[in-house]
């Protein structure tokens, strides 16, 4: 087993605003161990989502590098990066980003089908995970027929269905009322432990962050 499932070295991101250079992230180092839960907190606009996008290979850094499962992303072509991302990472967002025209089962099966899993096996694994998140009776319902809390549980199932090494979660309960947020969070943390998956969770909620093994604050472009 690799010592780290995800790491970054001297990771930086800047933008040009006219002639002014905006430094969002500045020489960040981060190391994520297997099955570890890490929380990142910070003010709105501090660059938390930008950092997750870089760690997930969804954006390119200005400098530095991201390494997933011992593979530096900057050595990969775009199709290779997509394949590695789909095989090793899961994503959960504040807004679920599910496909509304498909059922819960089809949405959760999708990452497996992209990985060329047999459709029958993909559906079997997706159905099992949806049962784990308490949606056994809802697997054939389209996303528009589900409540906000149910949709976020589908999103969590989709993130975990490929048995990823690490899940990147960006305010995963931020769009839910407090009661549903607590339910979804507790379920997410239970599944994280049972699946032995690492999680990096971005949150503004001190109560959520307190459950992590390590808490980082992102401010002025740096983690502390």
Image (tube, rainbow, N blue to C red):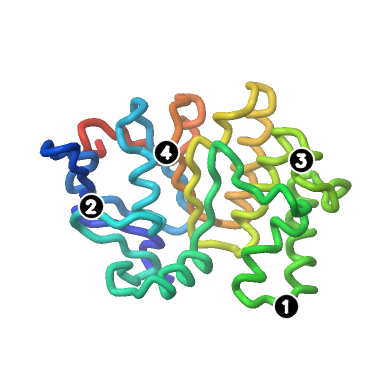
Residue 30 at what x, y percent from top left? 29, 51
Q: Is residue 131 left or right of residue 206?
A: right
Q: Which of label 3 and label 4 is nearer to you? A: 3
Q: Which residue bears the numbered disc 1?
A: 118
Q: Determine whether, in the image, residue 49 is placed left or right of residue 91.
A: left
Q: Which residue is mark 2?
A: 11
Can you identify the residue that label 3 sits on? 144
Q: Residues within 10 Å of mark 4 (few under 14, many from 20)?
A: many
Quadrant where the C terminus lies?
Answer: top left
Disc 4 target residue: 39
Earlier residue among tags 3 and 1: 1
Q: Report the mark closest to the observer, 4 or 2.
A: 2
Against 90, residue 204 (above or below) is above
Task: Give x and y (percent) for residue 181.
Answer: 63, 29
Task: Work out which residue is located at the far top of the displayed protein and give it.
Answer: 178
* Extreme residue toward the front, this view: 18
Which quarter of the image is occupied by the N terminus? bottom left
Badge 4 marks a residue whose secondary structure is: strand
| Picture coordinates of residue 67, whole percent (x, y) | 32, 64
Question: What kind of element bears circle 1?
Answer: loop
């Amino acid at each position: 087993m690799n010592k780290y499932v995800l790491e970054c070295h001297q990771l930086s991101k800047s933008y040009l605003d006219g002639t002014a250079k905006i430094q969002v992230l500045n020489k960040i180092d981060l190391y994520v161990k297997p099955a570890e839960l890490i929380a990142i907190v910070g003010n709105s606009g501090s660059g938390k989502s930008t950092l997750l996008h870089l760690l997930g290979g969804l954006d390119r850094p200005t400098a530095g590098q991201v390494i997933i499962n011992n593979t530096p992303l900057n050595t990969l072509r775009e199709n290779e990066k997509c394949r590695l991302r789909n095989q090793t990472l899961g994503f959960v967002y504040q807004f679920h980003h599910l496909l509304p025209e498909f059922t819960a089962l089809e949405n959760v099966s999708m990452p497996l089908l992209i990985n060329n899993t047999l459709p029958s096996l993909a559906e079997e694994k997706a159905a099992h995970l949806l049962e784990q998140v308490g949606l056994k009776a809802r697997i054939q319902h389209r996303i528009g027929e589900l409540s906000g809390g149910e949709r976020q549980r589908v999103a969590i199932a989709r993130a975990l269905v490929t048995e990823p090494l690490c899940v990147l979660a960006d305010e995963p309960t931020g769009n839910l009322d407090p009661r549903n947020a607590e339910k979804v969070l507790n379920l997410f943390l239970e599944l994280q432990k049972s699946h032995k998956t690492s999680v990096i969770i971005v949150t503004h909620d001190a109560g959520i962050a307190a459950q992590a093994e390590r808490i980082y604050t992102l401010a002025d472009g740096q983690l502390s």
